[in-house]
Image (tube, helix red, strand yellow):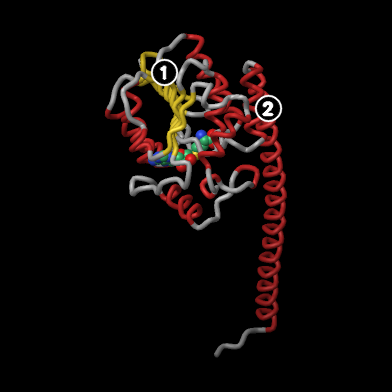
Amino acid sequence: MQRRSVRETIDAVRRRAASALGGRVELDAARAELSAARAELDRRTHEVRRLRRRVRELEVTLLDDLPDSVSSVAHAVRTEHLTLLGARPLAELAQAVLDVEAQGVGGLMLECGTARGGSAIVMAAAKSPERLLSVHDVFGLIPPPTDEDGEDVHARYAKITAGEARGRGGEEYYGYRGDLYTEVHDSFARHGLPVETSGVRLVRGLFEDTVTGDEPVALAHLDGDWYASTRTCLERVAPRLVPGGRLVIDDYFAWSGCRKAVDEYLAEHDGLTREMHSRLHLVRR
Ligand SMILES: C[S@@+](CC[C@H](N)C(=O)[O-])C[C@H]1O[C@@H](n2cnc3c(N)ncnc32)[C@H](O)[C@@H]1O
């Protein structure tokens, strides 16, 4: 083996030291960059949370634009955690009901998917007592999804059946409650709208069995989450919508199965115009 001169050895050692030092400097610089990026991310995350809170606070004020009798009920059902709807969709739903009344659109109103009753109670507050609001739900555990629903839905349903779902405000999830029908019935009365005298009908059972009939429909709030529930309601209700009548689809932007049911239905049927609000509205032309 050829021996290196002392000079060559010194040069080689210098080169190795310089390269090790260079690597170290680069590593230190990368670490500093990483911790600056982390700090920036924390700052931005904090800012996003602050802005989200601010948007929610401002959205609550939308309820104040409604007539007092509707606004007070909407605030009250939210305080009692009777609805999963945020302030903006709740205000828009109430306004849609008020518009139907103001424009004299004929037909009954429906809610398919009621849970603890909050959105239906607000609809009842906004409608005329002479107009029927038919409120449909199993008033128990939500029925299972099907193969038409995506992973998001199946994961949510697994959580529900595992007993791990929580309700609004950390309260017990509506599907685990003992007698949801009586609770909803009593909640209407507590908010000054007893079903017996307010033109409200509570109908217990699967949509597949209860959303029947052929009376004209002015407005329906479809809030059944999954594919089959949405598809059933579209097939049973959309053909009954009067001109200017409206479907408010709660879950189009939330659950894959609902979106699929709506997209399929619209691809197969004419005569409905899409309106984008915080929820998807379909209006009969
Ligand atoms: C998201 S919750 C409704 C929320 C309610 N609108 C509110 O203001 O919070 C959905 C409801 O639809 C009901 N549901 C879903 N599919 C159904 C079906 N096929 N038949 C009857 N009820 C159904 C569930 O049991 C549940 O009570």
Q: Quadrant of residue 14?
A: bottom right
**Side of 144 relative to 90 (left or right):** left
Q: Is residue 261 left or right of residue 136?
A: left
Residue 236 at x, y percent in the picture? 32, 29
Q: Which mark is residue 218?
A: 1
Considering every residue shown, the one lying at the far bottom of the view is 1
Residue occupied by mark 2: 58
Residue kind at label 1, given as amino acid type: Ala
Question: Where residue 283 sits in the image (x, y, percent)?
Answer: 40, 19
Tell me: residue 185, above or below residue 217: below
Which residue occupies 68% across, 64% down? 22
Q: Residue at x 64, y 22 (%)?
A: 71
In the image, residue 158 above or below residue 75: below
Point out residue 2 in the picture as x, y percentages from the top left corner. Answer: 56, 88
The numbered mark, 2 or 1, whose residue comes first in the sequence reads 2
Name the residue nearer the viewer: 263 or 192. Answer: 192
Outermost residue, top side? 103
The quadrant of the rendering that contains the C terminus is top left
The residue drawn where x is 36% and y is 34% is 210
Regarding mark 1 in the picture, which secondary structure is present there? strand
Position of residue 280 measured from the top left corner of the image (x, y, whole percent)? 46, 28
Near mark 1 (Cα within 10 A), the count class, few <14, some 14-19 or many ≥20, is many
Q: Nearer the viewer, mark 2 or mark 1?
A: 1
